[in-house]
């Protein structure tokens, strides 16, 4: 059966064209109205904070400690207790707070409990058994009733999938020891109402950081005072573009919901195209590796469903390992480092120890995975491959210049 309509136009292409025209028109109005706004600068806006940046900011705030105690963390636990009575036993004792360790966005570990944070402010896709895997990692250190889960979405419209919960779907982890928080209503209001008013006068840098972050969140959700008039005009423009200004409330809602669904469908297509191009970047990396390092075996694993990569196989004494660049199909992020990929079934402690000095010298390498001795994020821009290539060259030189202690 043909996928085109009687007019010969593919319905999906027609939808894409309509959504594209609508978005172009509204975005043009946004730029026009933004140009009228008074001058405003926010450092976090300029840096285009992603989910990792939000995790680092929130994690650093929670670990702040003054002469007395962890006041911000204590306040945050009070927020959780108001949301769910099952969190009422949580108190600050000897906390450690980590960000992006073991792929967990934020992790609080204390004497008698641990809290897993899953940050989805930008609506990243839930990975299969994502929450299940995080819980499993902690069951060796804590009892089940000591493990808690927080899911941070932008505005509450995104919830963890059943696939992400895995075997813990419907258990007490979800029913009792789980809270969904939103950045828009929970985190932003908590920072503005509970944290900012209670910061000591001498903590000027902390106050400045929180003011920048709350302002960034207000901008993210179009809540800045200077944006109010602009928002009114944009909403009027949307009703005009959709030709529903004079329609009934029910009719307006029907059209708006349909337009939201249409935009979501187009967004999904755009995300698929973006993913394909990111994999193309990896394929380019593979061919560049073959050209730049002709004396090494290069493995093309760029068709892998979850973690496509290009691997340069190396050997130090009797130990095999891979230097690779890889993309996560779940987050879309790209990273490189040294791992046991296509080399060994388990990590070799001697290799792990051998490269620890190199990772310390390079900085920002994370060693939190069974597959990786160490890895760090890079980018898809022109410097992404060049940065990886320089790292490969450093690894080759490091292996030549340093003996491996057994």
Image (spheres, helix red, strand yellow):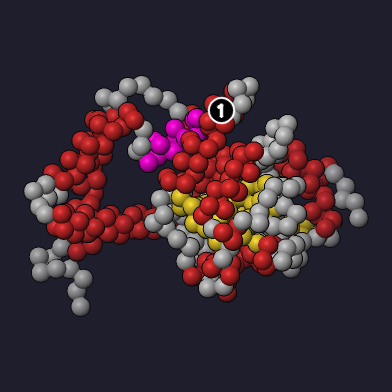
Q: Is residue 242 left or right of residue 135?
A: left
Res 23 quadrant in image: top left
Check if residue 215 falls in the magenta segment. Answer: yes
Q: Quadrant of the C terminus?
A: bottom right
| Residue 6 % position (x, y) | 10, 69
Residue drawn at the location 44% of the way across and 32% of the way down = 215
Check if residue 40 falls in the magenta segment. Answer: no
Q: Up-down: is 278 above or below 236?
A: below
| Residue 71 % position (x, y) | 64, 38
Q: Up-down: is 139 above or below 99?
A: below
Q: Quadrant of the N terminus?
A: bottom left
Task: Between residue 42 and residue 156, name the one nearer to us.
Answer: 156
Q: Is residue 273 left or right of residue 347?
A: left
At numbered mark 1, what does the secondary structure look like: helix, strand or loop? helix
Question: Looking at the image, can residue 81 be seen?
Answer: yes
Local crowd size for mark 1, using a 10 Å CA cut-off: few (<14), some (14–19), many (≥20): some
The residue at which mark 1 appears reads as 207
Residue extent of the magenta highlight: 210-221
């Amino acid at each position: 059966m043909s996928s085109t309509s009687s007019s010969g136009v593919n319905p999906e292409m027609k939808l894409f064209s309509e959504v594209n025209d609508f978005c172009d028109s509204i975005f043009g109005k946004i730029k026009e109205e933004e140009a009228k706004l008074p001058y405003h600068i926010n450092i976090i806006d300029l840096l285009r904070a992603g989910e990792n940046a939000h995790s680092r900011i929130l994690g650093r705030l929670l670990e702040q400690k003054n002469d007395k105690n962890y006041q911000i963390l204590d306040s945050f636990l009070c927020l959780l207790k108001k949301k769910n009575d099952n969190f009422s036993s949580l108190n600050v004792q000897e906390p450690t707070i980590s960000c992006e360790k073991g792929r967990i966005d934020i992790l609080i570990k204390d004497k008698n409990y641990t809290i897993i944070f899953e940050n989805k402010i930008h609506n990243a896709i839930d990975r299969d058994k994502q929450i299940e895997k995080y819980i499993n990692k902690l069951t060796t250190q804590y009892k089940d009733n000591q493990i808690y889960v927080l899911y941070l979405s932008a505005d509450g419209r995104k919830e963890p999938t059943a696939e992400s919960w895995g075997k813990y779907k419907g258990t007490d982890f979800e029913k009792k020891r789980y809270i969904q928080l939103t950045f828009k209503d929970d985190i932003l209001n908590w920072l503005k109402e509970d944290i900012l008013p209670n910061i000591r006068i001498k903590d000027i840098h902390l106050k400045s950081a929180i003011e920048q972050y709350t302002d960034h969140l207000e901008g993210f959700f179009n809540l800045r005072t200077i944006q109010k008039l602009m928002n009114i005009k944009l909403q009027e423009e949307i009703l005009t573009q959709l030709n529903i200004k004079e329609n009934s409330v029910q009719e307006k809602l029907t059209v708006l919901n349909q337009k939201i669904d249409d935009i979501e469908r187009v967004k999904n297509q755009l995300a698929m195209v973006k993913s394909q191009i990111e994999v193309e970047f990896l394929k380019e990396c593979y061919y560049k590796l073959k050209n730049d390092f002709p004396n090494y075996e290069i493995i093309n694993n760029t068709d892998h469903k979850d973690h496509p990569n290009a691997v340069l196989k190396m050997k130090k004494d009797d130990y095999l390992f891979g230097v690779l660049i890889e993309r996560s199909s779940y987050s879309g992020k790209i990273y490189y480092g040294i791992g046991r990929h296509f080399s060994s079934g388990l990590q070799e402690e001697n290799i792990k120890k051998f490269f620890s000095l190199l990772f310390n010298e390079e900085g920002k390498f994370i060693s939190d995975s069974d597959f990786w001795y160490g890895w760090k994020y890079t980018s898809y821009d022109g410097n992404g491959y060049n940065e990886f290539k320089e790292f490969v060259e450093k690894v080759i030189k490091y292996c030549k210049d340093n003996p491996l202690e057994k």
